[in-house]
Each structure stands twice: as structure tokens, then as C-alpha cells.
Image: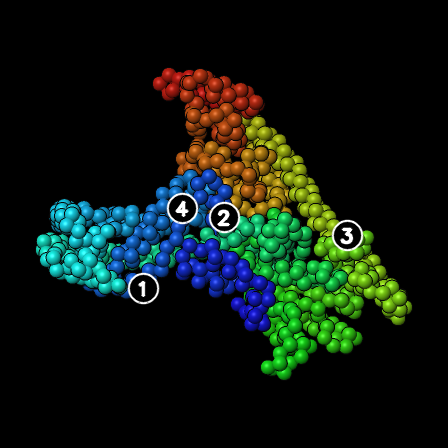
């Protein structure tokens, strides 16, 4: 990724987007990562980042948002926890519990239903298994306030009981001493205080020798001493010893706790990375909701399509002021790669140009952007811009010299994956010369297929944009009635600077404006009007050309469809002829059988010569019919769409086909020896390739139940089982089965439909009556299935 010049992100105010994101992070690590975000260039990674942010944003719309809270950076403690017998501070251990509770909350929140609604986040959250044992150990030691609980160990419980008892005894005895000495007038008004962690008496200095004990301190005035009575010293020492035992026991408990957590150190490292990254995605989603961001489409080809786009920071600023931002539409593609944007000063040219590049950078960083549905973004690898005054005293460069230095980099390094932004292109020197140089540079950049936006006031560049393919004019519209900019972008026409109108509204004297108008003449205004007219005519012609191209595509498709239909009709005509010949052939075959029978009967009567002559004649006619059928079939095959290379789809394994003359569509499972095994409706069949035609994949495909109909070594299959079929499925399967039986000259078939309600039996009988070649329809013998099986015999 290349960003030029160095301060480009700050110029585009992307750093403000970073800051807003960091402010909404719950942890310091995610906040630091937010301040260093950069656009990516890997399309799948960008798509996933956008999906994560989009799903995170949508979680805030429900009644129960994702649970998440603040957490600390505990990465430095990982190295310490690796050390055997090292004891982490309780504050660090409590931060481990914070991470575990965040992870537990996310796992509990991500139910199966939510995982279906938010599939990317669901996969992410469930990808790291939650370890409950560390949380159980931490909750066993610490309470909700972060203090070690009494039940952390039996020894600690006993120590604290002893401490409580000793403290109660001390309170009782101390209260008795205070009461006794107060009666004797040896104490000040307060009577007691705390010094060095011990309860002491406040004694006037003149009575300090009347009470035996240890003086811990005296007041600033020296008139009061803080004295621990002798009777309390021993009790305080005993309490101090118990407190020391408590600290030692807590240290032992924490050491044991660290030992238990040390086993899960790899999990804690991964968990911290998970929480920090999740925090950043959540913060990006929160920023996107500030300006109404949406997830756009990402495309591979360099094509920017923006619908109702707005500058995100402007949306935030205007929302605080109760204003609305004027959206804009823009498309940069192979026909119009560069937009030359013109219009009045303060009319929105620069903010629109910056907005386009800022939105692109935000998208490639995984931010949602304020655009409408149908907006598309590609992936750019380079972002080049020349915006604002880049004069440098240190490098001894004027404004125009710095622009030329930038242009040198652009011309050297730019390519078709570069997005360019040039503000006030050509300014900073003599307008005529500067315009010529700008025109030459723009031509070279267009040749490199760079995409971008150029703002200018030069009529020379507007005219060049009109003439040059790949470049289009655009204008920020000016409200001439109210003499103020409307901030509306109109692509396809150049804009006017409206310098005289703005000068008049600014209070410049009328005589000065008239003098300026007289000196400028009408040439420049006429040129701008001409440019507007020519640009409108150009857009109209381009629109008509595109419409014509679309009509040509549709016409080509219609022609292909008509040719396919004609070939299908011709094929059907030939097939009907084949079927007629086959019927005649079958008739001749029956006659031949009758002659054979007659021959056997007359053989004994010794009329062999006449019978032999008749039999030979029938054989010749039968052979002639066979040759005609074969010829007609071959001709029909040649007319078939796939044989002629004109089929809609090739016949291939995994593709879809239709049996010629029928409407059923099936999927090809295998192709062997010019035959295809296809899944058709509820069954699997084997059909000659010549009887099939390739089609496109149907809208719906049902799981096939296998019913075999194929050529077998012992002859064609004569059985069909349709039990459990619906009527429509049974009709479709039965029709194909009977067609195949006829083609294979099968003498009889058996249809197993079961008894049931009798509906399938009636369906089979009704369908069989439609075939004139079926001689008889009868149930099977009782021992062969009876009324649950129908036998069809062909004549």
C-alpha cells in the first residue's frame, strides 16, 4: 500500500476517524491499534473486515446488545506468570477475571439463533473455546469487590475468626480503659485515636505519667500525647501476629492460584488478542453508527459506484448543528475513469473530492461508510493526492514547484489500481501555461488508466475533458436565484465559476464588476455554454449507444433461441418419421411371424415353393424398412442441437439434460459408451445420448429416489416400483419408463404400486390406456402381488 504524500491521511481527516474509534475502545491496546489503522489491499480480508463491522453494528439494534466492558493491558504479566512460584498482584489477577468474564458473556450471548443471524461473529466467538476452570479458581479466591474471601482456605477462615475474636476483646478492654480514665479526667475530649495502626488514648501532657503504656506520638502543639495503654500492648501484638499470619496465608493462596492459571497461559494469550481485536471491531461499528454507515459491495474490477454518498465527518458535524448533508451520486469506470470537477468557490468541489478518497480508504480499513444501497468499491493499491498549499521554505519550494514534484511521482508510479485526487489542478502559475501542462499531465494519467477526481476552474481542462475518452466533466451546481452554492453534484456537464455573481453578492462595487465584464468579453461565457451543450449531447449519444448494445445482445440471444427451436422442430419431424417407420417395421415383423407359422403348417402339404417366395419377399421389405429407420434416425441425430454444436448447454457429468420430446429435466450422473445415467425426478435412468439435449440448471432440484431402468446383460428392465410416490411424480416416472420399454421393444412390464387407497393403481391404468401399443392391462396373479402389481403387455 502506497500513500503519497506523507501527510495524506491527515489531509483527508482520516486521523479524525481513527481518533473517534480510539475513544470508543474499551481497552488501551485496541485504542492504540485504532490510531494506527491503515487501508488493506487483500479483497477477501477487506470483505471479512466489513462483514465483522456490519454484524457488530447490527447487534446494537436488538434489545440485548453484546456484553462488553473495560479491560486492562495484562500482556506484561504473561512473562511473569511463566516463572515458577511467581505470585501476581491481586490487581493483575482480577484483570484476568475481567477477560474471562467478557469471554463468558460473549459465549453466553452468542446463541444458536444469533449465530445464524451473525454468522461471521458467531464463527469468530465460537472459534475460541471458553475455559471455565480459571474463572472458577478466581471466583473461589476473590469476591466481587476484589477482596480475598474467608473461604479461600480453611486456614484463612480460622485466622480471620481468631482476628475477629481478638479485635472484639481489644474493643471491650479499650472501651473500659477509656471509661475509667475519662472519669479520672486524664483524657482529652476525644479520648482516643489511631497511631501506627494501633488504638491509642489522647492524654494531656500533664497526665501522661499517670497512665502506664507506650507513647506513639504527640500533637503538633505538644499539649497532647498519643499513648497505648500497657494492658493493650500485648493484645495489639497478638493481633499483629494474626495479621502477619493472614498475609502469609493469602500469599500462599495466591501462589497456588497462579500455579493453576499457569497451565492456561496459551489460552490467556489468545484470549487477550481475541478481546482486543473484538474491541476494535466493536469501536469501528460504534463510529459507523455515528454517521449512519452501511456495508457496501466490494468488487474486483476497478469501478467506483456511489449512491447517496456523504462525507462522514460532515454528517457528524451537521447532526450536532441540526443540519443535513446533501448526498451525491458518482460512477468511475472504464468509460469514465477521471472526473474533472468544476464550479464556484466554496461550492463543495474539494469536500466532494476528499469525500470520495476518504470513503475508499475507510472501506479498505473495514469501516462502514455513509452510502446508499448498490454502492460498489474496488480495491486500490495506491492513493495519490495533491491538495492544499504544500509550499516548503525548508526545501526552497514554491506552491507550484511542490505541485510539479508531486506530479512527477504520480506520472512515475501511478497505474490502474491508483486513486488520484488533484485540487485546483494547473493553478499556481500563468493560467495559459499552467493549463497546458495540466492538460498534458492529465492525458498521461488517463493513459495509465488511473481513476480519480480533479478540481479546476480552467476552461481549457473542461474542454479537454469533453474531447478525451475516459474523462468526464462534472459540476457543483450554483443557485443563481439566491446566489449561493447548492452543493449538488451533476456529472456530465462542466460547471461555471460564477465569479461575477459571487463578486456582486460579496459587495464589490457595480462599476468595478462592469469593468471586469467588459474586459473579459463574452468569449469565456460562450465557451462554457458550448461546453455544457456538447457534454449533454455526448452523454445522450453514449446513452443511446449503450442502449443499442443491449438491444444487440438481446437480439443475438433471440436468434440463438430461434435457431435452437427450429433445430428442435426439425428433429421432432424426423423422429415422427422414424416412429412411423418403426411401427411399420413392427407390423412387418408380426406378418413375418405369421408367415413362419404358416410355413410350418404348409410344410407338410409340400407347398414349400410358394411359401418360400412369400417369406423372402417379407424379409426384403423388413430389411428395407430397417435401413430406412436407421437412415432417418441418423438424420434426426445430426439435426439434434448438440450434434450440430448449437445446443444450449453441452452434455457433461454434473450438467442437466432433457429427454427429447419431453419436459422432464434431470442431472447427468455418468456417461459411458454413448449412454448417460441421469437422475430424473425420483429415479435414475440410463438413456442413449442421442435421445438427450443439454439444458441449463433448473431453479429447483429434488433429491432423487433411485429406480433403475437400464440395459442389462439379460435384456431390458421390465420392473418399476413407484410405491410411496405422489401422483405427479408417479406420472412422470411412469411415462419415461413406458417410453423406454417401447423403444426397447419390451413385450411386457410389471408396475409395483401397492394396494393403499388405490390411487396409484388408478393412475397407472389411466396412463397405460393412453398408449395404443399396450395390448392388455391386468393385475398380477395373487402369488405375484395381486392387485398391488399391474402387468402391461405390448402388442
- First in sequence: mark 1 or mark 2? 2
Q: Which residue is tagged 1?
A: 76
Q: At 24% from the left edge and 55% from the top edge, which residue is drawn?
A: 261
- First in sequence: mark 2 or mark 3? 2
Report whether 412 appears left or right of 266: right
How far is mark 4 from mark 3, CA to CA? Answer: 56 Å
Nearest to the observer: residue 580 or residue 606: 580
Whole-percent x, y for residue 444 in the image: 69, 72
Are the residues flagged by discs 4 and 3 in contact, CB closer than 8 Å? no
Nearest to the observer: residue 700 or residue 398: 398
How far is mark 4 from mark 2, CA to CA? Answer: 13 Å
How far is mark 3 from mark 1, CA to CA? Answer: 67 Å
Whole-percent x, y for residue 449 in the image: 65, 66
Secondary structure at badge 3 equals helix
Residue count near mark 3 (Cα–Cα under 10 Å), binned few <14, some 14–19, many ≥20: few
Q: Which residue is tagged 3?
A: 544
Are the residues flagged by discs 1 and 4 in contact, CB closer than 8 Å? no
Amino acid at each position: 500500500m502506497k500513500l503519497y504524500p506523507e501527510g495524506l491521511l491527515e489531509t483527508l481527516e482520516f486521523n479524525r476517524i481513527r481518533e473517534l474509534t480510539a475513544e470508543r475502545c474499551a481497552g488501551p491496546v485496541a485504542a492504540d491499534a485504532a490510531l494506527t489503522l491503515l487501508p488493506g489491499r487483500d479483497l477477501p480480508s477487506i470483505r471479512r473486515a466489513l462483514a465483522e463491522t456490519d454484524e457488530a453494528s447490527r447487534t446494537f439494534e436488538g434489545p440485548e446488545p453484546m456484553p462488553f466492558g473495560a479491560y486492562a493491558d495484562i500482556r506484561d504479566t504473561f512473562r511473569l506468570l511463566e516463572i515458577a512460584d511467581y505470585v501476581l498482584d491481586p490487581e493483575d489477577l482480577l484483570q484476568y477475571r475481567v477477560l474471562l468474564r467478557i469471554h463468558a458473556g460473549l459465549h453466553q450471548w452468542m446463541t444458536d439463533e444469533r449465530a445464524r443471524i451473525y454468522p461471521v461473529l458467531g464463527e469468530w466467538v465460537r472459534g475460541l473455546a471458553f475455559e471455565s476452570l480459571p474463572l472458577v479458581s478466581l471466583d473461589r479466591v476473590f469476591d466481587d469487590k476484589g477482596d480475598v474471601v474467608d473461604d479461600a482456605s480453611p486456614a484463612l477462615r480460622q485466622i480471620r475468626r481468631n482476628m475477629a475474636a481478638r479485635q472484639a476483646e481489644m474493643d471491650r478492654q479499650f472501651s473500659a480503659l477509656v471509661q475509667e480514665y475519662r472519669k479520672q479526667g486524664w483524657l482529652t475530649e476525644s479520648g482516643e485515636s489511631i497511631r501506627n495502626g494501633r488504638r491509642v488514648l489522647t492524654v494531656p501532657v500533664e497526665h501522661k505519667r499517670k497512665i502506664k503504656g507506650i507513647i506513639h506520638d504527640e500533637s503538633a502543639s505538644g499539649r497532647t500525647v498519643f499513648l497505648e495503654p500497657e494492658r493493650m500492648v500485648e493484645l495489639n501484638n497478638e493481633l499483629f501476629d494474626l495479621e502477619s499470619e493472614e498475609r502469609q496465608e493469602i500469599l500462599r493462596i495466591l501462589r497456588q492460584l497462579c500455579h493453576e492459571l499457569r497451565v492456561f497461559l496459551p489460552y490467556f494469550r489468545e484470549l487477550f488478542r481475541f478481546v482486543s481485536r473484538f474491541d476494535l471491531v466493536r469501536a469501528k461499528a460504534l463510529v459507523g453508527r455515528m454517521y449512519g454507515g452501511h456495508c457496501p459491495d466490494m468488487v474486483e474490477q476497478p469501478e467506483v459506484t456511489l449512491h447517496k454518498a456523504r462525507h462522514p465527518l460532515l454528517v457528524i458535524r451537521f447532526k450536532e448543528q441540526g443540519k443535513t448533508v446533501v448526498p451525491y451520486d458518482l460512477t468511475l469506470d472504464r468509460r469514465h475513469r477521471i472526473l474533472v470537477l468544476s464550479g464556484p468557490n466554496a461550492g463543495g468541489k474539494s469536500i466532494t473530492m476528499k469525500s470520495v478518497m476518504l470513503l475508499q480508504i475507510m472501506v479498505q480499513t473495514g469501516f462502514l461508510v455513509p452510502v446508499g444501497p448498490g454502492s460498489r468499491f474496488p480495491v486500490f493499491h495506491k492513493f495519490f493526492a495533491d491538495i492544499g498549499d504544500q509550499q516548503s521554505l525548508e526545501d526552497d519550494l514554491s506552491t507550484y514547484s511542490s505541485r510539479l514534484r508531486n506530479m512527477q511521482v504520480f506520472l512515475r508510479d501511478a497505474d490502474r489500481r491508483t486513486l488520484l485526487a488533484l485540487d485546483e489542478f494547473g493553478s499556481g502559475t500563468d493560467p495559459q501555461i499552467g493549463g497546458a501542462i495540466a492538460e498534458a499531465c492529465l492525458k498521461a494519467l488517463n493513459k495509465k488508466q488511473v481513476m480519480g477526481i480533479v478540481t479546476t476552474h480552467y476552461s481549457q481542462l473542461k474542454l479537454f475533458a469533453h474531447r478525451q475518452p475516459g474523462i468526464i466533466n462534472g459540476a457543483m451546481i450554483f443557485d443563481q436565484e439566491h446566489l449561493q452554492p447548492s452543493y449538488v453534484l451533476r456529472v456530465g456537464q462542466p460547471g461555471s465559476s460564477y465569479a461575477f455573481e459571487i463578486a456582486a453578492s460579496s459587495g464589490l462595487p457595480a462599476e468595478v464588476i462592469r469593468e471586469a465584464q467588459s474586459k473579459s468579453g463574452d468569449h469565456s461565457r460562450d465557451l462554457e455554454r458550448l461546453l455544457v451543450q456538447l457534454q449533454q449531447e455526448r452523454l445522450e449519444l453514449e446513452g443511446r449507444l449503450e442502449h443499442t448494445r443491449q438491444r444487440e445482445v438481446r437480439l443475438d440471444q433471440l436468434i440463438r433461441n430461434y435457431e435452437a427451436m427450429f433445430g428442435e422442430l426439425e428433429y421432432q419431424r424426423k423422429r415422427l418419421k422414424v416412429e412411423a417407420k418403426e411401427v411399420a417395421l413392427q407390423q412387418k415383423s408380426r406378418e413375418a411371424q405369421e408367415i413362419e407359422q404358416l410355413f410350418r403348417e404348409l410344410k407338410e402339404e409340400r407347398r414349400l415353393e410358394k411359401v418360400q417366395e412369400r417369406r423372402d419377399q417379407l424379409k426384403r421389405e423388413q430389411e428395407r424398412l430397417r435401413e430406412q429407420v436407421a437412415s432417418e434416425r441418423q438424420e434426426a441425430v445430426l439435426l439434434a442441437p448438440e450434434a450440430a454444436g448449437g445446443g444450449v448447454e453441452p452434455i457433461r457429468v454434473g450438467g442437466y439434460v432433457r429427454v427429447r420430446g419431453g419436459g422432464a429435466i434431470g442431472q447427468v450422473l455418468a456417461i459411458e459408451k454413448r449412454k448417460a445415467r441421469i437422475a430424473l425426478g425420483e429415479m435414475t435412468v440410463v438413456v442413449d445420448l442421442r435421445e438427450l439435449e443439454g439444458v441449463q440448471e433448473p431453479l429447483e432440484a429434488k433429491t432423487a429416489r433411485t429406480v433403475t431402468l437400464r440395459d442389462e446383460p439379460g435384456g431390458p428392465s421390465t420392473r418399476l416400483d413407484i410405491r410411496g410416490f405422489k401422483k405427479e411424480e408417479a406420472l412422470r416416472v411412469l411415462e419415461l419408463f413406458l417410453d423406454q420399454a417401447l423403444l426397447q421393444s419390451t413385450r411386457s412390464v410389471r408396475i409395483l404400486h401397492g394396494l393403499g387407497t388405490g390411487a396409484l393403481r388408478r393412475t397407472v391404468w389411466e396412463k397405460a390406456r393412453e398408449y395404443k401399443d399396450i395390448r392388455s392391462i391386468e393385475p398380477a396373479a395373487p402369488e405375484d402381488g395381486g392387485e398391488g402389481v399391474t402387468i402391461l403387455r405390448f402388442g
